[in-house]
Amino acid sequence: MEQTVFVDLLHQVVIAPAATDTIANLAAPSGRRVSDERKRRAAWFNSLSAEDRANVEHVAQEAARGVAFGIFCVLDGCRVIEDYDQRGHLELHHIYKGTKTLLSSSADDSSAGALHELL
């Protein structure tokens, strides 16, 4: 699997649904015991104009993308999660039928391109 395919698939199955699901749960909270706070937010959101709702939906999309971008930055090594000089590195591989493809690495000498730049 190529990096671009991985990023595209993650967008389809993680990022876009995260924003869509967030808006759906905001508009109509699910669960047996919906808190008063969630009910108040639903009432507020549902009272918004179409333009304002679209703006909230856009913010949810940007937040979902921002989370993915941050995770990719950690995997790529441009954001570190360890606070000491001697730290390890992260690698993300796709393995299919015995073929191992490096998708991302935080190692200084890695040949993998940066996932966060593909988002």
Image (spheres, rainbow, N blue to C red):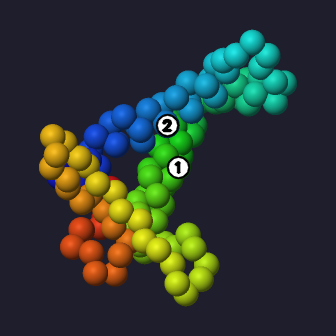
Tell me if 118 is positioned left or right of 54 in this view: left
Callout 2 secondary element: helix
Figure quadrant of the C terminus: bottom left
- Residue 109 spot, x, y in % from top left: 28, 81
What residue sits 36% from the left and 34% below the top? 13
Q: Amino acid at mark 1?
A: Ala
Q: Residue furthest front?
A: 98
Labels 2 & 1 near each other (Cβ < 8 A) = yes
- First along the sequence among labels 2 and 1: 2
What residue sits 38% from the left and 71% below the top? 106
What residue sits 59% from the left and 83% below the top? 84
Disc 2 versus disc 1: distance between alpha carbons? 8 Å
Q: Nearer the viewer, residue 41 or 105?
A: 105
Q: Inspect this view and state whether residue 40 appears.
A: no
Tell me if 49 is positioned left or right of 37 in this view: left
Callout 1 secondary element: helix
Binning the other alpha carbons within 10 Å of mark 1 as few (below 14), some (14 to 19) or many (20 upward) gives some
- Residue 7 spot, x, y in % from top left: 29, 49
Q: Residue furthest bottom?
A: 85
Q: Inspect this view and state whether residue 8 appears.
A: yes
Query: Which residue position is annotated with label 2?
Result: 19
Residue 118 drawn above or below residue 85: above
Binning the other alpha carbons within 10 Å of mark 2 as few (below 14), some (14 to 19) or many (20 upward) gives many
- Residue 77 spot, x, y in % from top left: 41, 72
Residue 40 drawn above or below residue 56: above
What residue sits 50% from the left and 53% below the top? 67
Q: Nearer the viewer, residue 47 or 25?
A: 25
- Residue 61 spot, x, y in % from top left: 47, 43
Q: Residue furthest top?
A: 32
Q: Amino acid at mark 2?
A: Ala
Query: Which residue position is annotated with label 1?
Result: 63
